[in-house]
Image: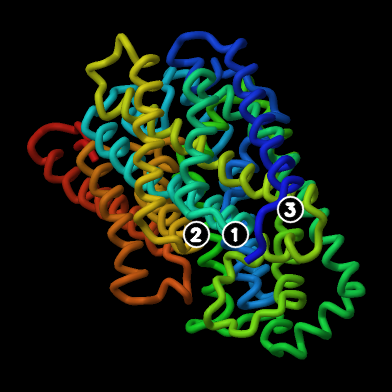
Amino acid sequence: MQSANMPVIASFLFFLALFVAIGAYSATRAKKTADDYLLASRSVGPWMTAFSAVATNNSGFMFIGLIGMTYLEGISAAWIMVGWMGGDWLAWLVVHKKLRQLSGAAAVDTIPSFLALDEKGQRSDLLALIAGLLTVVFLGTYSAAQLSAGSKALHVMFGWPHETGAILGAVVIVLYCFTGGIRASIWTDTVQSLVMMASMLMLSVVALEELGGFGALWSQLGAIDPKLVQIIPEKQFGFTPFLLGWFGAGLGVVGQPHVMIRAMAIRDPEEIKKARTIYFGWYWIFSAGCILVGMTCRALLDIPSIENFDQELALPQLALQLLPGVLVGVVLGGLFSATMSTADSQVLSCSASIAHDIFPSKQSDHYSLSRIATVGVTALAVVIALYGSRNVFALVTLAWSLLASSLGPLLVLRVLRQRVSPAWGVAMMIGGAASALFWRYGLGFGDAVFDVLPGMLGGFLIFGVSMLRSSAEVPARAEQGTSDLPEI
């Protein structure tokens, strides 16, 4: 482990100070209302929407988890992102614009509140409560994974204890989110996305130059292990189910409140298309950079025993080996940007759920309660980061899966204006999450087919059962002299 030096620390602290300054400035433009704190008064343009969404979606999972997975599996790990972005694109195409239109018309500020509204605009407090609780539990775990990712990087670069990085990230998030809300999050996300891209492209170019180009990289990986250059991975059920599983993971964005809230905050539903184009242009380039860096890490890092090496530390190790101190700080700033741009959004979504959905009786003071909840949720995330699993890839994929499986199917049905009663909605959320957990832990098939797909299918299956039951009850009601449809 290399000791910290002043250029690295100075460069890293510069980016932290920059994020805090941007967040603080955004607070001067904020209004002291719940709508502004949670949705920036629905005034965000397409460029900021896209950059904020892509920074929020590309979390420590990309900088730490995906690079670590590529380090282990080689080029075949790229299929994770091919499938993921395919599902994500479908969600943007079908769901995002309708979500903005319907949530704006109903004047709801949170994803659980939107899920709680039926096709007639009637709110179910039970649905809002359950969806809010699931948001806080799963997103709280997810945000802890981001803090854990940052702490890992500081540990390997500076030799600091794991606790230091988690606490430092949490303090920075609270400093700007407490006053500026989602406006501060979106503004800082925009700058953080640029830092993320610059650091990833810089490291990939330097690493390729060190190796002597793509050909040398490919040859060296093949010499280390032929499986590292095997295009199609060998999976339990074959390649197609594996790819479909990750397509389902991308589609699972519809169950991620911290990402979907960006679609609700854009100023005009018609600008969703422009935001989508910007979003995926950025996403493809950044994903390619992450895969490339993961491969160069395997080729360049001299690890005596890979069995005892934490592959999720590959990125900071490579930066220390190849870059001068100031540029190492840039890479670390990019990594921290990725973790904070996701964690701050997750904390705010949890805060919104606490203020609007779990304690709806506090209607008159949503703004103050949301700010207090921001501090409380951040503290909870720090505790989970310190005492939970430090495997970023496992934590992120589990939290993403449970959110997608529990909230995703119901959100899709809501934007399609399908009739779902509170009881069936709760059944869908619980059944979807249970399906994902059973697939991963009960059957042990999570590596073969990512559990978002079976989890969301479980939720839709429950809706199908409700439709069949409704169809069966209609003739019985007709015989009793009424044509009223039963509540589904």
Count of marks, rendered view = 3
Assess disc 2: are there few (<14), some (14-19) or many (≥20) residues with their C-alpha within 10 Å of its C-alpha: many
Question: 335 or 304, which lies in front?
Answer: 304
Please tell me which residue is depicted at 12% across the width and 45% down the height of the picture: 476
The image quadrant where one finds the N terminus is bottom right
Residue carrying label 2: 392
The image quadrant where one finds the C terminus is top left
Q: CA distance from mark 2 to mark 1?
A: 7 Å
Which circle's residue, 2 or 1, is located before the other in the chain? 1
Image x and y of residue 248, in percent: 51, 59
Q: Is residue 40 visible?
A: yes
Q: Is residue 94 visible?
A: no
Image x and y of residue 410, in percent: 37, 43
Vertical placement of residue 321 versus 239, above or below: above
Query: Which disc number belongs to residue 64?
Result: 1
Q: Are marks 2 and 1 in contact (CB under 8 Å)?
A: yes
